[in-house]
Image: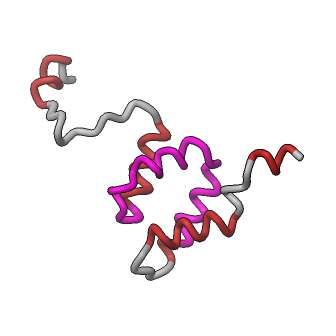
Amino acid sequence: MQTVKDILKSFDPLEDKYISREYQSYGIYLAEKLQDERHKSMYIKFAKTIPRPVLAEALRFVIDSNAKRKAALFMWKLKEIGAFKSRRKAKK
């Protein structure tokens, strides 16, 4: 088992990711699978706010396809599923 001292010696703040929550990890996983690391903060927010089965269904759809623009197809599928419904409309 590593000591804290050993971990801090090998820690590189420019390379290592700061992940403290599970949804952050899943958001980064989505960004990597969709080959869209540039927008990883958006995927982290999705992982926090959108139910996991909805995200998993959209991701499965994209992975099964041979799309060039995987992130765009993922967003389209989320919209088709209804993941972006307004909360105001849901309250009525």
Q: Main secondary structure of the magenta part?
A: helix
Kindly identify the residue that appears in the image at 62 percent across and 48 percent down: 50
Is residue 49 a member of the stretch shown in magenta?
yes
* Image location of residue 76, percent across then percent down: 58, 70
Image check: 39 left or right of 59? left
Above or below for 64 versus 23: below
Q: Residue furthest left?
A: 9
Identify the coloring: secondary structure
66 sits to left or right of 77: left
- For the N terminus, the image quarter is top left
Residue 9 location in percent, x, y?
Answer: 10, 25
Instruction: Say left or right for 87 vs 64.
Output: right
To which quarter of the image does residue 25 belong? top left
Q: Residue at x 17, y 25 (%)?
A: 7
Residue 75, picture quadrant: bottom right
The image shows residue 70, relative to residue 47, as above or below, that is: below
Picture residue at 45% right of the left edge, 33% below the top: 21
Give the residue at x 33% y 56%: 38
Residue 10 to residue 25: above or below: above
Residue 11 position in % (x across, y down)? 16, 31
Is 65 positioned to the left or the right of 35 in the image?
A: right
Highlighted range, magenta: 33-61
